[in-house]
Image (cartoon, grey):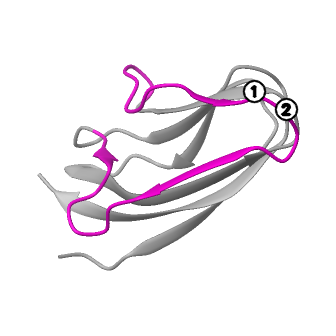
Amino acid sequence: MSATKFKAIDTSTSGNTVLVAAASGKKIRVLSYTVVAGGPVTVKFNDGSNDLTGPITLSAAGDGGSASLPEGGLFETPAGSALNINLSAAVQVGGHITYIEVMQ
């Protein structure tokens, strides 16, 4: 198994923001995430083409969401795809993810 990696989330861009760049032949498996919003926004994680999670609706400033499943992971990208966070509006969202890269 590859080493666990950590990435901060700090964006206010509506639409997709790359969290982890694509790596040839590797999947990005998310083990945990935490997001906290500065205002009303809906958050999703995707691979640029397909949603990897359902919508995480944060209704007000200070609202947050988190999940973890370190044994098997919560979700993963297809091999060779980036991991993005997608915001429904230009609202500040902070937090972090833990992930591993998995060879195809």
Q: Disc 2 vs disc 1: which is toward the camera?
A: 1
**Residue 10 appears in the rendering:** no
Q: Are marks 2 and 1 in contact (CB under 8 Å)?
A: yes
Closest to the observer, 76 or 49: 76
Instruction: Specify the amino acid type for callout 1.
Output: Val
Instruction: Specify the amino acid type for callout 2.
Output: Val
Residue displayed at 41% across by 32% down: 53
Closest to the observer, 34 or 22: 34
In the orientation shown, which residue stands out farthest toward the bottom?
Answer: 3
Which numbered tag is attached to residue 41? 1
Helix, strand or loop under label 1: strand
- Whether the magenta-drawn stretch holds residue 69 is answered as yes
Query: Percent position (x, y) of residue 89?
Result: 78, 21
Which numbered tag is attached to residue 91? 2
C-alpha gap between disc 2 and disc 1 = 7 Å
Closest to the observer, 47 or 87: 87
